[in-house]
Amino acid sequence: MKAARIVEPEKPLQISELEAPKPQGSEVIVKVKAAGVCHSDLHLWEGGYDLGDGVFLKVTDRGVKYPVTPGHEIVGSVLEIGPDVKGVKVGDNVLVYPWLGCGQCVACKAGNENLCDTPKSIGLFQDGGYAEIVKVPHYKYLADITGLDPDGATSLACAGLTAFTAVKKANSNSPEFIVIIGAGGLGLMGIQIAKAVTKAKVICVDLDDKKLQTAKEMGADFVVNSNVIGSVTTGSGNAAQKIISLCNNKGADSVIDFVNAPQTAKTGLAVLRKRGNLILVGLFGGSMELSLVTIPLKAITIQGAYTGNYASMVELIELAKKGVINPKITERYALDDANTALENLKARKINGRAVINP
């Protein structure tokens, strides 16, 4: 089988011929139809994360071993099954849940394998979907997607799932206004989900007017260009003032930061009302200083959101089947063009979501 592999950080992916895996026990072999191109793939390719203050967290320090085949948003058809597999048959169209855990820690036992202390995620810690075939360690990690577009369904395993988890947290305080920072693939999914499962008005913030226009098409009630000048919005003042004014001059009840860079996080904190809720999602990186007194005085909550559990992915699939959300796939690449896909993602040339079709 053919696979695009990261041999070492910041080096071109190598297109390799590998021996096709054979299933044992509860394992399932999936023929890949589409694999999403995600920013987590980019961090894996770059070798880690910027923690700020000159500190770089290497993925190898988290347990990643190169070479590895990236790709954790995987849709395909069941090719082979192990002798212990139940409820899955050859030919089934499935979405792979990639956030595998150890199965023994507190998080795993609670059904939250995505928060495992020793993760074994497909496409990060074991070979993923930038390949013609992928091995799934257990059939319980598969979900039926009959009736869904295979390309669009890929994002439900990560981008959509992460957005769903973040929106659930944002909805915990019955918000009147939710601010979504970032109109990329995650942000666009977040807008659709927020409009579907909350009663809040949604304000989307980004630097790019083209992306903001797409955000409006996806259901955003208001959009704000954080550069303000030359934006699709009207009025004067800086972006934070504009956002607060849209929230009836009270500030936002919840902010979801799908970028999570120092400046975006500062903006999120600046626009929060008293008792507000800031959910940090993106892995852009960096660090920032906090005015500590304002945290208790305003009784605000700052929390992270990292992917989601299997049950949430199944919920999200049902929303997609009902047509409530519509993942926007804008770019498609062949497996041989995996390097181009990652380069375009890094250069912010992808407006929406991209997939690789092996």
Image (cartoon, grey):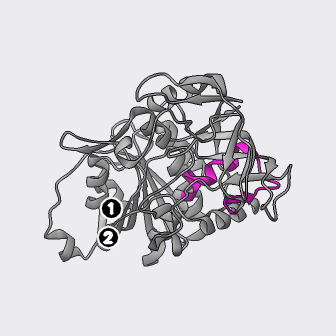
Mark 2 and mark 1 residues within 8 Å of each other at the beta carbon: yes
Residue 220 seen by the camera: no
The amino acid beneath tag 2 is Lys
| Magenta stretch holds residue 106 | no
Report the residue marked by disc 2. 250
Taking the spot 82% from the left edge, 65% from the top edge, the residue there is 87
Task: Write down the region rendered in magenta.
Answer: 140-161
- Up the image or down, 184 lies above or below 107; here it is above
Task: Give the number of callouts.
Answer: 2
As helix, strand or loop, the secondary structure at mark 2 comes to: loop
Report the residue marked by disc 1. 244
- Find the distance from the CA under tag 2 to the CA under tag 1: 6 Å
Q: What numbered label is drawn on residue 90?
A: none
In the depicted view, which residue is nearer to us: 103 or 184?
A: 103
Residue 283 place in picture, x, y as percent: 38, 47
**How would you rate the neighbour count of disc 1 (Cα within 10 Å): few for under 14, some for 14-19, many for 20 or more?**
some
- Up the image or down, 83 lies above or below 40; here it is below
In the depicted view, which residue is nearer to us: 280 or 272?
A: 280
Looking at the rendered image, the quarter that the N terminus falls into is: top right
Residue 118 seen by the camera: yes
Residue 2 place in picture, x, y as percent: 68, 28
- Mark earlier in primary sequence (2, 1): 1
As drawn, is 318 to the left or to the right of 231? right
Looking at the rendered image, the quarter that the C terminus falls into is: top right
As drawn, is 201 to the left or to the right of 25? left
| Magenta stretch holds residue 142 | yes
Residue 344 place in picture, x, y as percent: 51, 27
Q: Quadrant of residue 256?
A: bottom left
The amino acid beneath tag 1 is Ile
Taking the spot 45% from the left edge, 42% from the top edge, the residue there is 232
